[in-house]
Image (spheres, rainbow, N blue to C red):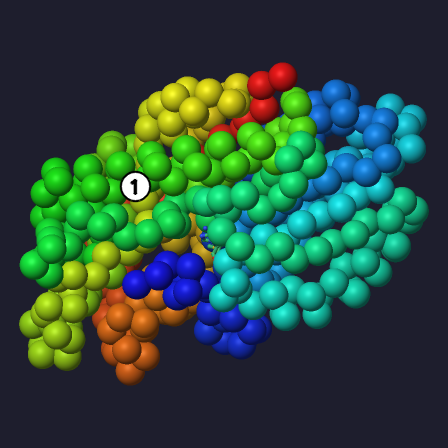
């Protein structure tokens, strides 16, 4: 399975799309805003005045969140310039994602976005472009970017670790699709080594692309203990396992399929940043919330059944393309019905939480 070919969120703006089902990532962008603001303000002090400030959003996906983070960044640049009585710079913003991303929906939303910038009376031009390709490699010319932002994307690793399936075709992580309670230490190690390789390439690539003193704020899903099995993908794996027991999914498929995903701990992130050596870690914060916190935040009146239905549709919007590529589109309705049935009981029983890591970095001068 080539991750770059199959990994994307559900496109369009229909009822199963990522665009209509991405409230949690949106809540996360809002929560992280003060950290992004602080980084942007510092960047303005060190890099303005300049003619053109170049910004990238890595793993932008498609939907309202795509331009939400960018809009906050543009506002902060303008506010900072106003405070300093400086002329705001021209802005160039690159929206990056893998080739399977629904860039068409993103591009269609740009005229409205430009209109909103006009309404805010931002006179200096802002040019927005799509940049398709993997952030685990070079995307931009050397020394060209001032700020890189990424939210809820870096937990997707570049490939499923090779060692998870033996040369003879045996799965090492039988019955699971991610690190789970029943996974061996070898499974965890395979994932951790792949994460280390990928995150190192990510940092090295950005270090080449960012100007001296350029900065990044990266938010990713994380974990507390290195082999923390309380991931939502462990729960999806349990439901797939039930479907195997009911004869609806081939056992061998489940035994050899694994998600290209890794949620690192704060210490693991620090370890890679220090070993790679191009960046100064300005700030590393951890947030934790129940799986349904963002639904309660929007409407505290939703009962448990309604919250489970929303959580199920949200996880489906993210996981469906990759899960369907392995288990078939037909299995998806059944899988996410099962998911919805007892996801919140499981969450309460196991104390499951989304853990978010926010990493603020500056390129060494
Ligand atoms: C959960 S979405 C997050 C989207 C958006 N940033 C938000 O906060 O709502 C993760 C996005 O990361 C993208 N992604 C994953 N791996 C990537 C890679 N190697 N290079 C570029 N984009 C990647 C996925 O295609 C997906 O659109």
In the rendered image, which quarter contains the N terminus? Answer: bottom left
255 left or right, relative to 121: left
Is the CB–ligand 1 distance for label 1 below 8 Å?
A: no
107 is higher (above) or lower (below) than 66: below
**Residue 306 visible here:** no
42 left or right, relative to 268: right
Residue at the disc numbered 1: 194
**Residue 117 visible here:** yes
- Residue visible at 42% across and 59% down in the picture: 4
- Residue visible at 9% across and 79% down in the picture: 247
Q: How many marks are shown on the rendered structure?
A: 1
Q: Position of residue 76 (x, y in %)?
A: 75, 36
Provide the secondary structure element on which disc 1 rests. Answer: helix
Question: Which quadrant would residue 341 be assigned to in this image?
Answer: bottom left
211 is higher (above) or lower (below) than 21: above
Spot the residue most to the top.
Answer: 365
Question: Which quadrant would residue 328 be assigned to in this image?
Answer: bottom left
In the rendered image, which quarter contains the C terminus? Answer: top right
- Residue visible at 80% across and 30% down in the picture: 80
Q: Position of residue 246 (x, y in %)?
A: 9, 77
222 or 306: nearer the viewer: 222
Spot the residue most to the bottom.
Answer: 330
Q: Position of residue 274 (x, y in %)?
A: 41, 20
Q: Position of residue 212 (x, y in %)?
A: 66, 23
Q: Callout 1: few (<14), some (14-19), or many (20+) C-alpha neighbours within 10 Å? A: many
């Amino acid at each position: 399975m080539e991750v770059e070919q199959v990994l994307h969120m559900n496109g369009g703006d229909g009822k199963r799309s990522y665009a209509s089902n991405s409230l949690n990532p949106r809540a996360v962008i809002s929560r992280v805003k003060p950290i992004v603001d602080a980084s942007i303000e510092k960047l303005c002090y060190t890099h303005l005045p300049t003619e053109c400030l170049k910004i990238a959003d890595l793993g932008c996906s498609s939907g309202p969140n795509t331009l939400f983070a960018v809009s906050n960044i543009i506002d902060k640049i303008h506010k900072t310039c106003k405070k300093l009585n400086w002329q705001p710079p021209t802005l160039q913003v690159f929206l990056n994602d893998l080739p399977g991303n629904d860039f068409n929906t993103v591009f269609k939303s740009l005229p409205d976005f430009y209109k909103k910038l006009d309404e805010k009376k931002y006179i200096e031009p802002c040019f927005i472009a799509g940049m398709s390709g993997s952030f685990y490699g070079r995307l931009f010319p050397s020394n060209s970017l001032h700020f890189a932002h990424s939210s809820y994307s870096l937990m997707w690793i570049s490939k499923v670790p090779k060692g998870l399936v033996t040369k003879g075709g045996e799965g090492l992580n039988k019955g699971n699709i991610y690190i789970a309670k029943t996974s061996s230490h070898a499974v965890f190690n395979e994932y951790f080594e792949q994460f280390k390789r990928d995150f190192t390439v990510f940092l090295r690539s950005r270090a080449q692309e960012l100007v001296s003193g350029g900065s990044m704020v990266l938010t990713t899903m994380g974990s507390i203990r290195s082999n923390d099995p309380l991931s939502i993908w462990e729960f999806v794996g349990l439901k797939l396992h039930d479907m195997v027991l009911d004869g609806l999914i081939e056992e061998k498929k489940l035994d050899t399929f694994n998600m290209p995903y890794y949620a690192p701990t704060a210490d693991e992130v620090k370890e890679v940043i220090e070993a790679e050596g191009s960046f100064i870690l300005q700030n590393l914060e951890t947030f934790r919330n129940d799986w349904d916190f963002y639904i309660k935040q929007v409407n505290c009146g939703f009962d448990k059944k309604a919250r489970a239905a929303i959580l199920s549709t949200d996880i489906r919007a993210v996981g469906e393309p990759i899960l369907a590529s392995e288990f078939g589109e037909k299995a998806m309705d059944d899988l996410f019905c099962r998911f919805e049935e007892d996801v919140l009981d499981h969450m309460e029983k196991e104390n499951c939480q989304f853990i978010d890591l926010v990493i603020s970095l500056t390129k060494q001068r």
